[in-house]
Amino acid sequence: MNGAECLARTLVACGVDTVFANPGTSEMHFVAALDKVPGLHCVLGLAETVVTGSADGYGRMTGRPAATLLHCGPGLANGIANLHNAKRAFTPVVNIVGDHATWHRVHDAPLASDTEGLARCVSQWVRTASAASTLGKDAAAAVHAALSAPGQIATLVLPADCAWNEGGTVSEPLAPPSRAMPALDNVRTIARALCSGVAGMLLLSGPALSEQGLRAAQRVAQVTGARLRTPTQVARMARGRGRVPVDRIPYVIDLALGVLAGTKHLVLCGARPPVGFFAYPGKPSTLWPADCTVHMLARAEQDVIGALEALADELGAPREAAIPDPGPKPEAQRGVFKPDAFALTLAALLPEDAIVAEDAVTSGRALLAPTFAAEPHDWIQVTGGAIGHGFPAATGAAIACRERKVVCLQADGGGMYSLQSLWTQARERLDVVNVIFANRSYAILRGELAAVGARPGPVSEELFDLGRPELDWRLLANGMGVEAARVDTLEGFADVFRAACARRGPFLIEFRI
């Protein structure tokens, strides 16, 4: 068989069953091989940022890598922003990036580029195939690298002749990598620190935000009084009634400093030390107090849940800790959009077992706390700060979990980065309710202008304004094959959202703010 067919069959053998693709000429032999190889669901994205963002959403919900198919270095470059988000989320992804035939590279054709150099910006594993005969081994190694804890981006560059030449041999999957447990002495040291009578905090990320991880953390909190927090951005978190409610460290640096104030022992559980999203004049980069000791219970690539369970056992915590009651289920609100009121309305209406994909930096800041009392759900966020993540992440999550309702909360400015995702949702008949916060501006930047001490003026206002001409999201969605409605009150939103959740298929709600 040729190299392309060998590659496709090896991906299937290694457990990859989905390919998000935007192919070009160099990838045609791989595309042709997909007709011969059962077991691969191929999903077309009309832009590479849709392809990579969908692979991110898929990987977060399954814990397994999807493959992407990208056209040469420029195609990879178009998808780098959402690969950056995926890398920050530790999402497993296997990129297949076509390239010129090995003997054509010397002619410096127009699409020639440093594909490996581009890939290294967002990949922990990069390899360029050298022959059809070794392509199966390359593919198996790429999947193995993607599955390596805590989850990695693996990029395999595929020269065209390695795809069309004969001599390919399918490779079996490599042994799955395992997560190592931290040293028991370290667990004991942290247990003593948390029992010292001073304020402690556990910062939870990665597997610690699964339902099992949260329960283990709650065991620790119950016997030590330590507070539980997550970083500002979470890759995936189990939330809602019956799950331990853990709020984020705020994005605004002064609020974040206030949350961490007084903490004497900060324990990192799969998380990095908390730092400001940006630097601001006269303000610190690190968010913990100067007299706080930072402890690493478990790094992201280690067995975070096992470490939390070991810490709870060392503390003599009961096997089952009481989960705080989030209070009565909120009621849908009335009136114009306000972040708190919208959050309460969403909490009242969110379907059980939904997946929420959020990329709404300004309108979404108040969403987390009120939705602790919603029905059980999973929440995924933009993790690397590269906006335009919500639409494609929701698309990938809906393909990964077709039986679950997906709710996408997307800012209008960021939504324009990856609008083409709606077309894929329509084509695949995905069960996604997209909510657009249409404030017709880059509202986050107005706040950032003030935060750095600058004064707004006519030029800055021009750069933040999306209202001339205004975006018509109903027409944009309809043009992509997605039904849409516009609302401007919370009661109007509630009516349309209920109706959209009662049916299947993609829908878009433009909420005019």
Image (cartoon, grey):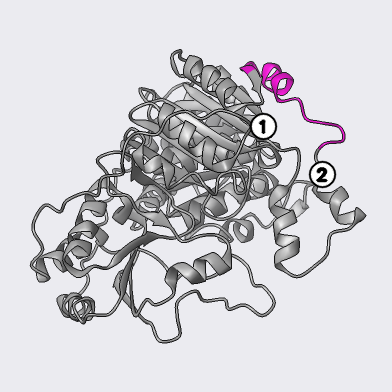
Looking at the rendered image, the disc whose residue lies closer to the viewer, 2 or 1, is 2
Q: Position of residue 325 (x, y in %)?
A: 26, 45
Determine the residue positioned at 67% across, 73% down. 280
Q: Residues within 10 Å of mark 1 (few under 14, many from 20)?
A: many
Please state, as top left, top right, bottom left or bottom right, where the N terminus lies in the image.
Answer: top left
Image height of 219 relative to 314, above or below: above
Look at label 2 and name its amino acid.
Answer: Asp
Does 481 appear in magenta?
A: yes
Q: Left or right of 246: which side holds 217? A: left
Residue placed most toward the observer, 437 or 416:
437
Residue 465's tag is 2
Part of the protein shown in magenta: 467-484
Q: Which circle's residue, 2 or 1, is located before the other in the chain? A: 1
Determine the residue positioned at 44% across, 75% down. 261
Q: Element at badge 2?
A: loop
Determine the residue positioned at 47% across, 60% down. 124
Residue position marked by numbered label 1 in the rendering: 419
